Image (tube, rainbow, N blue to C red):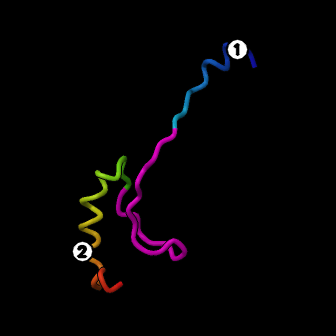
Amino acid sequence: MTELARTERPQYTDRTVWVLSTGEDHEGGLVLGVYASKDAAKGPFIEAAHRIPFDLDQA
């Protein structure tokens, strides 16, 4: 590979996305949304938590 070819390659940076989903890791589930930040996911997360059919404090 020439020096020119190396400089033309795209530079990737670490990126984090937040995936809000139902179900458990080993059981699958439904993806409710993908968000660019934790703050962006906070509102939809709270809405989804309110739909859980039991009291989170006793879980």
Disc ID at residue 27:
none
- The residue positioned 70% from the left and 14% from the top of the image is 3
Contact flag, marks 2 and 1 (Cβ < 8 Å): no
- Which sits in the foreground, 33 or 59? 59
Q: How many marks?
A: 2
> Which stretch appears magenta?
14-33
Q: Is residue 54 left or right of residue 5?
A: left
| Residue in the image at 31% along x and 56% along y | 41
Q: Nearer the viewer, residue 35 or 37?
A: 37
Q: CA distance from mark 2 to mark 1?
A: 56 Å
**Amino acid type of the residue that numbered disc 2 sits on in the rendered structure:** His
Disc 1 marks which amino acid? Answer: Glu
- The percent position of residue 6, horizontal first and vertical second, equals 67, 20
Q: Tell me: residue 36, above or below residue 30.
A: above
Q: Which mark is residue 50?
A: 2
Does the magenta portion include 59? Answer: no
Marked residue nearer the N-terminal end (2 or 1): 1
- SS category of the residue bearing label 1: helix
Q: In the image, is 28 to the left or to the right of 39?
A: right
- Outermost residue on the front side: it is 57
Q: Residue at left 30%, top 80%? A: 56
Residue highlighted by disc 1 = 3
> In the structure shown, which secondary structural element does the residue marked by tag 2 occupy?
helix
Image quarter of residue 2: top right
